Image (cartoon, rainbow, N blue to C red):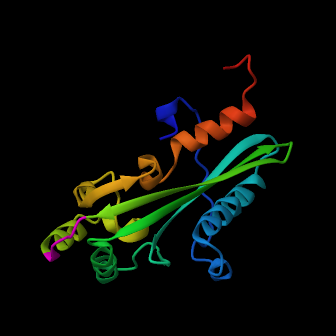
Amino acid sequence: MLRQIGLEFVVDVPRVEENAAELRHMPPGTIALELAKKKVRQIADKYQEAVILGADTIVVLAGRILGKPNNEAQAKEMLAMLSGRTHEVFTGFAILKLPEQAWLTDVERTAVTFRTLSEQEIEDYIRTGHPMDKAGAYGIQDESAVFVEKIEGCFYNVVGFPLSRFYQVCKANFLTHNEE
């Protein structure tokens, strides 16, 4: 998605536990933001000068955080819970500019309503393997796009990164009027 808006970057994957128990008492947006910052801090130790971006996406249904399913049975349970209901997707992102130690952070929230899904539709989708590495057991950019009845907010946030919000934050904080 970052290439889509013309950015060049290097991927450096952090090793951060995303199910941090110490964050469970926080609101979902804060959890997503704290995990994003944790990822950035871990990568920042490797660089003297850089702009580092980290993000984390959380799916929430009626106050319950739905992480990535551990197995097909859990994926089926999550999709059945989402069926016919509205859930929220929160993505927190953190940007650290080195060596200045300048932080920019933000959180995007999107509401997604699923139509009622049949058991067969859920089973067919699980067989694709796509639910297994996604929070909430679905990826709006794949076959599960047909599950979505309505979306309120940023589509790209549900994909995994709020491009428009990211651009606006960067434009407001990194670009001078001469660069626009």
Whether 29 is among the magenta residues is no
Q: Residue furthest left?
A: 120
Please report the bounds of the magenta region as a residue range: 115-119
Q: Residue 175, percent across and down?
A: 72, 28
**Which quadrant of the structure image shows residue 171?**
top right
Q: Residue 152, percent across and down?
A: 41, 53
Which of 175 and 8 lies nearest the eye of the viewer?
A: 175
Which of 10 and 172 lies nearest the eye of the viewer?
A: 172
- Quadrant (top left/top right/bottom left/bottom right) for the C terminus: top right
Q: Residue 23, percent across and down?
A: 66, 77
Q: Residue 65, percent across and down?
A: 49, 76
**Residue at the (66%, 60%) spot, across then down:** 39
For the stretch drawn in magenta, what is the main secondary structure?
loop
**Residue at the (34%, 81%) spot, across then down:** 74
Q: Residue furthest right?
A: 100
Q: Is residue 27 left or right of residue 42?
A: left
**Residue at the (43%, 55%) spot, across then down:** 158
**Which quadrant of the structure image shows residue 83?**
bottom left
